[in-house]
Image (cartoon, rainbow, N blue to C red):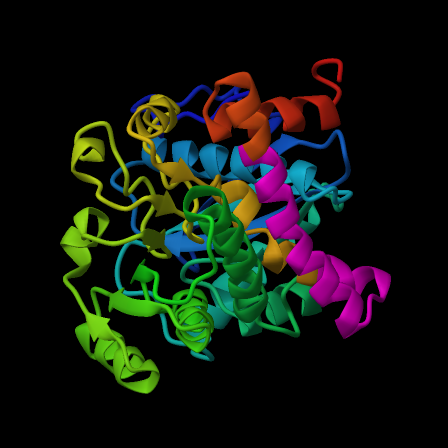
Amino acid sequence: MSYDAALQQPDLFATEQVITCRDDRVGLRAVIAIDDTTLGPGFGGVRWRPYASVAAAVSEAQRLAQAMTLKHALAELPYGGAKSVIMATGPIPAEGTPQRNALMERYAHFLARTAGSYIPGVDMGTLISDMQLIRDHGAKAYCADVDPGAYTATGVYAAMRAGVRHALGSDLSGVKVVIQGTGHVGSNLARYAAADGAKVVVADVDEARARAVAQEIGGTVTDASTAVEADCDVFAPCAIARVVTAENVGRVRAKVIAGAANDTLDTPAVADLLRERGITFVPDFIANAGGVLQVHAGEVGWDEDELMHQLEAIGDRVASVLADADEHGTSSVTAALRRADVRLGRQDA
């Protein structure tokens, strides 16, 4: 099972399909990566940001699509893994502007050509209104009616509690939690932890946003660039990817790492280094499944009680994976990937 960091030269055959999309009239350059459709159509968000090169865009699309395959498999959902990226060549047009709408409408035409094998949703740089435009112009889209951020945070908090119970044998009361990123997910996570008595420290590249969240919950603020090395019980990355690396892992002082950011580790080997240091790592592709569970709830008609039950079950999965890792003397990532491979039919149970 691949869990590699982005490569300089992507392997175009690392996923089932790689589709490029171009329309110079609206400034569209996009890449769709469909990783695995064993369990169903590929579902994954549309990320809109600058990329250093086409190769970097392809690599990120494939890497994120692979993570979605894992996320859906371990959440026992009937979807495959996919992702797409739009390459920004300047400032991203504001919501509702003719430039943004024209690009999204054209992108919808490319998405419709996948005939439902790829279902997009919101991600970094895209909005619910973008998904509505995509849906209105002929392509199926998720996250077009409800922002999944709060549900993602609920699932991550269930995962965090499971990680703390495993590592510290306690609940969150009195536990020091550093949350890196105070967007929709990180800010809600901060509220949940503070409500349960945690000592919450927040960090964000937008310092004003971090200060506002800290003031609301009675927490404090730290520097986003050094948050990974903060003296704390729990580090919760909810912003940039690959924040824990082979270079900085020796300076991590948290006892538990549990957050919402995709690809928290820069390579699989870092999971083993964390285990050697006695640090409990909650795999991000289990912890951050709340958003896709919320989307699926809308598709199959779960009521709010059933959805909350499914979100809390993320904690149960985390606890089981951590126990399995301990029993077999492996990292939590290895234990989780083994389960995903069984679910995907790649190895026997």
Residue ranking furthest to the bottom? 216
Q: Residue at x 15, y 52 (%)?
A: 226
Instruction: For the N terminus, give its image quadrant.
Output: top right
Q: Is residue 35 above or below residue 227?
A: above
Pick whichever, 182 or 227, lies toward us: 227
To which quarter of the image does residue 16 belong?
top right
107 on left or right of 249: right
Q: Position of residue 282 (x, y in %)?
A: 47, 41
Q: Residue at x 56, y 65 (%)?
A: 154
Q: Position of residue 41 (x, y in %)?
A: 74, 41
289 on left or right of 329: right
In this picture, which residue range is highlighted in magenta? 295-322
* Residue 311 within the magenta-colored segment of the rendering: yes
Q: Residue at x 41, y 25 (%)?
A: 4
Q: Is residue 303 above or below residue 339?
A: below
Pick whichever, 346 or 166, lies toward us: 166
* Residue 289 within the magenta-colored segment of the rendering: no
Number of numbered discs present? Answer: 0
Q: Residue at x 22, y 79 (%)?
A: 211
Q: Position of residue 98 (x, y in %)?
A: 45, 76
213 on left or right of 293: left
Inspect this view and state whether residue 202 appears.
yes
To which quarter of the image does residue 129 belong?
bottom right
Residue ranking furthest to the top? 348
Inspect this view and state whether residue 344 appears.
no
Q: Position of residue 24 (x, y in %)?
A: 41, 52
